[in-house]
Image (spheres, grey):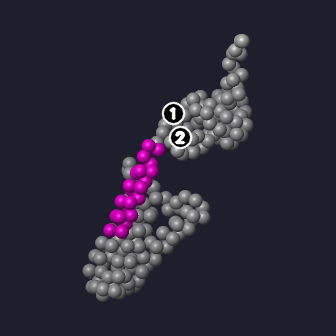
Amino acid sequence: MSIGFIYFLSFAVGLGYAVFVGVAGHLFGGDAGDAHMDIGTDLPMSPLSPTVIATFLTGFGGGGMLANSYFQMSVGKGVLVAIMCGVLLSGGTYTVLFFLFRETQAGAEFSLEDMVGRTVQVITTIPEGGTGEIAVEAKGSRINGPAKSVDGRAIPRNAAVTVVRVVGNLYYVQEISHIADRMPAQSH
């Protein structure tokens, strides 16, 4: 196997991955490449994410092909150029994505306990004594979470409910019409 083929294969795999992620993201929504792959850091994205690795492969292969074919460098010098191109391209990509994700994710964290007292919507019927699902809007994000009725009553889909408490990731809710039923009637 020649060094030129290795460069070409690296370039093709990296570029092919980028095209796949772009098409898959466009067709199915989201990032099929999981640019946020967690390796136990507090960084907004990993330097070992598939996107950064694919960018390194593309830069390594492209730089190597140029060094080998166009500039006709020796194998040793060509490999150094290929590595430098891969590191520069993936490092630049990582830096841009790091700052982009850091800015877009700033302040996106919230505590589930912060939801207590909020009015939310049931998106999957909560059966009597069972668990359904609610939609919660917080910090510009919509998340769905499992929910139970605090009094064990069934709550229909699309009903407005108030979050009474949160245990783990389970929301205990009460339908707003039942809260009004319990309030004393005002005398005129």
The residue sitting at 38% across, 48% down in the picture is 42
Earlier sequence position, callout 2 versus callout 1 = 1
Quarter of the figure with residue 56:
bottom left
Element at badge 2?
strand
The residue positioned 50% from the left and 62% from the top of the image is 33
Determine whether the residue tagged by mark 1 lies in a helix, strand or loop: helix
Q: Residue at x 72, y 12 (%)?
A: 188
Magenta stretch encompasses residue 22:
no
Q: Which mark is residue 138?
A: 2
Q: Is residue 5 visible?
A: yes
Residue 143 locus on image (x, y percent):
57, 44
Occupied quadrant, residue 141: top right
Of residue 1 and residue 140, the one placed in the foreground of this image is 140
Return the residue at label 1: 114
Kindly report the secondary structure that dominates the magenta region of the rendered protein: helix
Q: Measuring 62% from the left and 31% from the top, which residue is drawn there?
A: 162
Residue 125 visible in the picture: no
- Horizontal and vertical percent for residue 182? 69, 20
Asked if disc 2 and disc 1 are in contact, CB closer than 8 Å, the reply is: yes
Which quadrant: the N terminus?
Answer: bottom left
Pinpoint residue 51: horizontal percent, then vertical percent: 44, 64
Q: Magenta segment range?
A: 88-108
Q: Amino acid at mark 1?
A: Asp
